[in-house]
Amino acid sequence: MTSPRETTSFSEQKKTNLRKENGMFKKFLTAAFACAVFGTVSLSAFADTDESSAENLQKIEYIHSEIAEKRVNSSLYEEIIANQIVFYSNISNGAVIDYPVNLDLPETVTVTIDKDGKKSKYKLGEPIEEPGKYSLTIMVEGKDLLGADEDEVYYGLFRFWITEPSEESNSDDESSEDEDSEFSESSEDESSDSSGDSGESDYSDSTDTSSDNSGGEDEKPSNPDNNDDEQGTLLPKTDKVTNISQYVTSKKIRVVTDKGAEFFCNIPAGMATTNAVKFELSEDDTAEYKLMKDGEVLSGFEFGRQLTDRGDYTLFVNDGDSSNPAKFSFTILGTGTHGITKYTVPDGCKIEKAEYGKNEIRVNGNSVDIGDEGVYSFEVTCGELKFNESFTLDNTPPEFKVNGLDDEGKAQGGTVFIELLSDDIDTYKIILNDNPAKKSLELTEAGKYKVTVYDKAGNSTSQEFEIIYQMDAMAIVAAVLGGALLIAGGVFFIITRKKFNIR
């Protein structure tokens, strides 16, 4: 038999085991709760979460929005995304600079940033300082926009390139800390220390002092081959060049081929300009150059001579590989042009101001939308270089009249007169029987004609017609009599021959 003491011990042990089991269950519940709090979920719960997230992602509509830009002053730009959200920057969209970028972005936007093609971290309000090519995707949700749906997200791209600071920019920074001492150290002529203009850059002073012979540090030699020994700021690549790198210097664009040939131009490749274009060659250059205009070789091209005729140009540079020459392309618009719907400058340049007539119009990064006919003006900067571009948009074809034609477009003999009706006609050309003919407003030679008239903006109008010979009455009588005489002579010859044979 079991004693009462043993029974009591067994009962107490059973209670102890039960307490242990309850403690283990509580620990299990605690662990399960901790897993739920810290993100560990069951497979079924995870699947449910994925399905709901996928449904939410499918509902979101991403809409691209161009970032409209307006210049406030020389160092401040107003940017607008989705026509409502405004932010500010110290640079223009698409700029190439060598100093930090500051963006004043509202909290309603979300920003993701790529640096040199890789994702990078960015915190609102922090300056962007490290050199590299940046692309910022700026997003704003529809709930923060008037008239937009909550499941819409509008996004735009803001891009720029921070290059390595040049030696000149470094010297400028140092001069701001200690103007007199740093300026005298960077000077090539110590006699300029007394000028007291240490805060001014070499670019601004070179123009002011070039006319005197003071011999100060800001004086630049007049020889164009010698005043561009500076490296310049590298421009982004463009589809308007092949095997070429471009650098902005203080006075012009320095162009260097991959093989080492070097020349200078007053505009960058890809520029559509209304000004004259001029190339300058280095003294020791031995490359071969060929200039083409509208697909044809331009004969008589010489370095140093200005190009002014409207057209699309490409300069080919053969510096060792004739099968793969370097190419530098640009367009001359002239003061009058036609067919343009957008004016664009190359990457690395920016349109500071645009006007239609006397009214300022909006600039979208490095382009401006062109609308109605009229006068358009632009202030363009490319590094230290500044361009003033202006043209008149004219899409109206010229008018002329060909006098002396019948209803079928033919002239039955006589003379055809071409009457030029428009007052802005620039030139005309005449094709006779598919060959160029001498230019004349009075046409008499028989044949098929095509006359094309051009106005000063490049618009053209063409008309085809034919001049046919027509004999007068006397000519017809003479032809008939001549034919009769020929017939009579033939008959006489036949009769005479027969009589001779009979004998």
Image: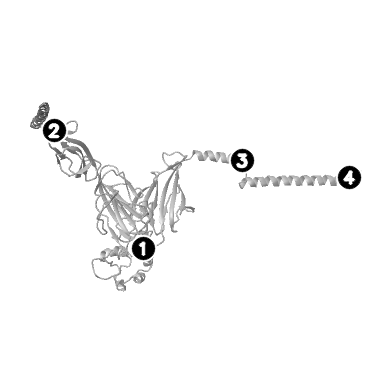
Q: Which residue is mark 3?
A: 45
> Would residue 382 be seen by someone viewing this image from the given angle?
no
- The quadrant of the image that shows the C terminus is top left
User: Three-letter amino acid code at disc 2?
Assistant: Gln
In this view, the residue farthest toward the right is: 1
> How packed is label 4: few (under 14 Cα within 10 Å), some, or many (20 or more)?
few
**Which of pointers 1 and 3 indicates the residue nearer the eye?**
1
Mark carried by residue 4 = 4
Tell me the mark number nearer the camera, choosing from 2 and 3.
2
Q: Amino acid at mark 3?
A: Ala
User: Gap in Å between the C-alphas at discs 1 and 3?
Assistant: 62 Å
108 relative to 329 in the view: left or right: right
Q: Mark 1: which amino acid?
A: Gln
Q: Quadrant of residue 290?
A: bottom left
Q: Earlier in the sequence, mark 4 or mark 1?
A: 4
Residue 324, position in %: x, y? 37, 54
Q: Are marks 1 and 3 in contact (CB under 8 Å)?
A: no
The residue tagged 2 is 470
Q: Are marks 4 and 1 in contact (CB under 8 Å)?
A: no
Closer to viewer: mark 3 or mark 4: 3
Q: Give the x, y percent position of residue 74.
A: 33, 56
